[in-house]
Amino acid sequence: MKIRKVEEQPMKLHTKDGPKLRIRAKGKTKTGRMKVRNVRKSSLSGLKQRAESSNASIQVKRQQLHVMGRKALKEMDGGEEIADSVDIATTFAYPVASAASKGTKLLRNKKKQMDKRKKEAGSKGNRRKKGASDRSDSETINAREVERRKASIKAKESNLKKKDSRSGGNTGKGSSSKKGRISVRSRMIASFISNMRANEEEKIALSTAAKQTVKRELAILIKKIIATVLPGFLGLFSIIALCGIVVVTVLAVIYNSPFAIFFPLPDSGTEDPRTVLVSYYQEFNEKVFDLEENGETVVYKNSEDGVPVSNFNDTLMVYMLLYGDGKAGYVMDEEGKKNLKKVFDEMNYIDAASSAVEMDVGDSLGKVWVTAYCPCSQCCGSYANGITASGKTARAKHTIAVDAYNPIVPMGTKVVIEGTVYTVEDTGDLNHYGNDFDIFYAKHEQTGQWGRRHVEAYIAEGNTNKVMVTSSNTTVHNLTYKDYMDKNSLTDDQKEVLEELMSADTSTLYESGAIGAQVAQAAMTKVGCGYSQDKRMQEGWYDCSSLVYRLYKEAGIILDATASTQGKQCYQKAQIINKKDLQPGDLIFYSYEDNGQFRNISHVAIYVGDGKMVHAANPRRGVVLDPLRTSSVVFYARPYR
């Protein structure tokens, strides 16, 4: 391959003619041209300029070396790129070099300051040494001056002694004149003291006279004040004393009258009459419960719409009338309790009566074998809970059982045995022991009294046979204050006072309704909540008895958990009240079924006033506000006194 050789040509630089410049020199303006060279700018021109400007702060020798180095590099092949690299490195190294330079300068300045401090400390030490030497010199000078002055004083004293010894012959005459001067001076002092004493005595006399004058004037003023004010003061004091006497007299009369029961009773060291009366009612009601459990039919002498009338207030007022007139009847000492029990027994007692009535009954079942049982484990085994096979609670003189597999009569049949009508409500393994009927009793010892008898039995319904049926009932006499007045054991004045005590304005004064009002207000907030027996203790859910239980618990009163036991608890504690005395918070107990519970109570509601009541009705309605219902009421109660 042939290579054509090209001759080297010299490189020419093309430049523009420089622009014309006007040069003023010595009053003349010259026009000429200045050659201007165009410099090619590269991407590193800015870095080069910063490097060149930074080099300006370096010493001249280094700058000259740097410029010379750049010129040398440009003349070499590839020197331009090397020069650019050097410029870049110089640019980035400048901050480090500058920091190092400043650090060196800072160290030098710090060293200079330390040297300066050392010099100053040395100069201060020299000054202190010089001051100490100066002080020691001055102290030496002062000591010398003191010694010199002491010597001078001693010299003067010796000169004075010499003079006195020379003038010894003239001492007698001088001493006599000196004594004369002293005598005159003493008389002057004595005269001055005498005058001072006279002035003091005069001042004391004047002060005493002034005090006596003030006392006389003050005594006169007090007498005038007493003469003017005392009659009015005595009159005011007399009025106050009279009012006090009247108040004390009124209180004494009240607390020695039947009306004392309406006021806060003073501390007599004995129980409250109400507390003692409640204990009497509890004992009495336990007897009534025993009769009911034994199958007795209990009726009350005084009832309203089938609801027993409470005579608690009547009994208390009759006692206060008889034993609180002229003495403190509220004092429950032994005599007071005895008197209260006497009144209670006169107004509360039980009268049991029975009667035999000939009845038309159905067919005779012939002679049957009859035994007895009770709800104990010995009689009923694992079924000892008082609940019959029909689901009802067994009751004495009412429930009778037949054989479970071969009953002599169907469930629910009424039969007459020994003059008593029974209802078939239970079953048992009777034929296994050769028995036809099993009569229920409340207590085990009563079953032993019946034993096993072979008697005739009749179907209770029908008119085939005539049978003498014995009916027995128990009457509870709960006398009211009007019944007591009908005994004619009170005077007309006593009857008038008793009427006043039992008036509507005073009969409830001694019973605070604050707790009941709190319960009634809380009951209103529960209207709209749900009804559930399973969730009865959860917030937002109630049944009738849990509503009463939870609201009264919030008020500080613990009741039983079910409606029937709540009713029995109130009845035992003599907390039943009359319909006319209903206040917000009182309870209404209802019976809608024959459930075998206490008085067959199956529902309870809370009276909230204005003829309204709140109760948990049923799952469909929940907790509702209804008008007061007076049908099917067992009794009304206030679970506090």
Image (cartoon, rainbow, N blue to C red):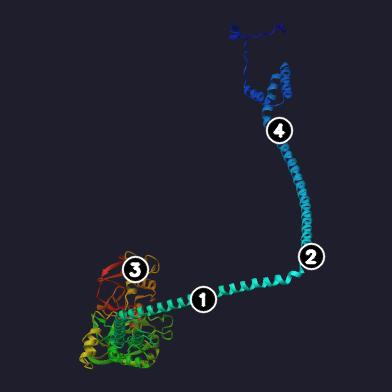
Residue 362 visible, this angle: no
**Residue 190 percent across, percent down from the top left:** 58, 75
Residue 367, disc: none
Q: Determine the CA span between mark 2 and mark 3.
A: 124 Å
Q: On the picture, is 31 further left or further right than 583?
A: right
Per the image, label 2 sits on a secondary structure element best described as helix
Q: Determine the CA span between mark 4 and mark 3.
A: 89 Å
Front one among 359 and 524? 524
Of the 4 image quadrants, the one containing the N terminus is top right
Q: Determine the CA span between mark 1 and mark 2.
A: 51 Å
- Quadrant position of residue 98: top right
Q: Which residue is mark 4?
A: 101
**Residue 110 percent across, percent down from the top left:** 72, 39
Front one among 281 and 167? 167
**Residue 137 percent across, percent down from the top left:** 79, 52
Q: Which residue is mark 1?
A: 198
Q: Determine the CA span between mark 2 and mark 4.
A: 92 Å
| Residue type of the residue flagged with mark 2 | Lys
Q: Determine the CA span between mark 3 and mark 1.
A: 95 Å
Tag nearer the camera, 1 or 2: 2
**Circle 1 crowding by C-alpha within 10 Å: few under 14, some 14–19, many from 20:** few
Disc nearer the start of the sequence (2/4): 4
Q: Which residue is mark 3?
A: 522
From this view, report whether residue 545 is shown above or below residue 529.
below
**Circle 4 crowding by C-alpha within 10 Å: few under 14, some 14–19, many from 20:** few
